[in-house]
Image (tube, rainbow, N blue to C red):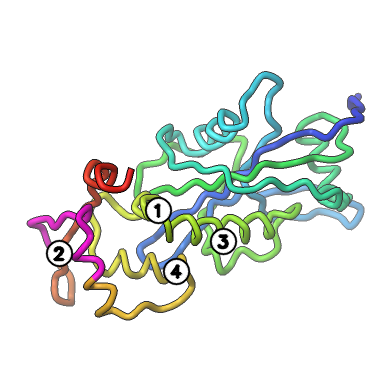
Amino acid sequence: MLESSLYPHVSVDCVVFGFTGERLNILLISRNGTSEDGFYSDMKLPGSVIYENEDLDDAAYRVLHELTGIKNIYLQQFHSFGSPSRTQNPRDKVWLENAIHIKIGRIVTVGYVALIKIGQKLQAFSDRYEAHWCDINDIGTLAFDHNIVVEKALHYVRLKSAEDPIGLYELLPKRFTEAESRILHEVIYGKKVDIRNFHKKFISLPYIVSLDEKQQNVAHRAARYYRFDKIIYNQIYR
């Protein structure tokens, strides 16, 4: 028997971005169910209704830890979504009520951005989820209002990175090439950058440390590796 409630429920939804070296990917969860139109299958963002005595940030970290097994994740709260139309789609409403066993009249969600290195060794995803890394340009129509949430999250990352680029280095490998850094900027901001201007700025950054290592077994000229020095960055900008 589903409980009734006069008050909105609160949830967190996590937009998890990862960088493949060429494309910006997002972590999505498969959603299957049956509606009046029959069986359906689509995708949604990782998320959860918050527990009774749980802080918002703790709920977001819980969702991400259950999904990835990683605890130290770059996580930022970026926007809240509370339109009454969020759960007016009967398919979404029925699926959510069946998933959390609570009667839903309205639900407000707090959006979080997480930036993660796809190359990190992730634990096997929980049996409760079927998670997929998807190209940000190929996600199609998501459940609920999650396309709007993703759009807002990407806009937030662009604005945040312009004033504080530390988050971008959470997407890059621990050692990376200048080309990888440039391509990341291009996929984040959705436009090409001038290679010469980017090079001048890149090599002038004090927190970008050149390594005595180069790419191995590549068909082109081997590029030098660099690393991001968080200590130097914090000394200068924090």
Left or right of 95? Residue 234 is left
Q: Amino acid at mark 4?
A: Val
Q: Nearer the viewer, residue 152 or 206?
A: 206
Q: Amino acid at mark 1?
A: Asp
Q: Amino acid at mark 3?
A: His
| Label 4: element kind | helix
Query: Could you tell me residue 40's position as x and y percent?
Result: 78, 55
Q: Amino acid at mark 2?
A: Arg
Q: Which residue shows up at 62% across the image and 31% down it?
A: 56
Query: Could you tell me residue 80's position as x and y percent?
Result: 69, 45
Q: CA distance from mark 4 to mark 1?
A: 17 Å
Instruction: Confirm whether residue 54 shows in the render.
Output: yes
Residue under pointer 1: 164
For the N terminus, the image quarter is top right
Residue under pointer 3: 155
| Label 1: element kind | loop
Local crowd size for mark 2, using a 10 Å CA cut-off: few (<14), some (14–19), many (≥20): some
> Bounds of the magenta span?
201-215
Local crowd size for mark 4, using a 10 Å CA cut-off: few (<14), some (14–19), many (≥20): some
Which-is-in-front pick, marks 2 and 1?
1
Q: CA distance from mark 2 to mark 4?
A: 21 Å
Closer to the N terminus: mark 3 or mark 1? 3
Residue under pointer 2: 224
Residue under pointer 4: 187
Image disc number at residue 62: none
| Label 2: element kind | strand
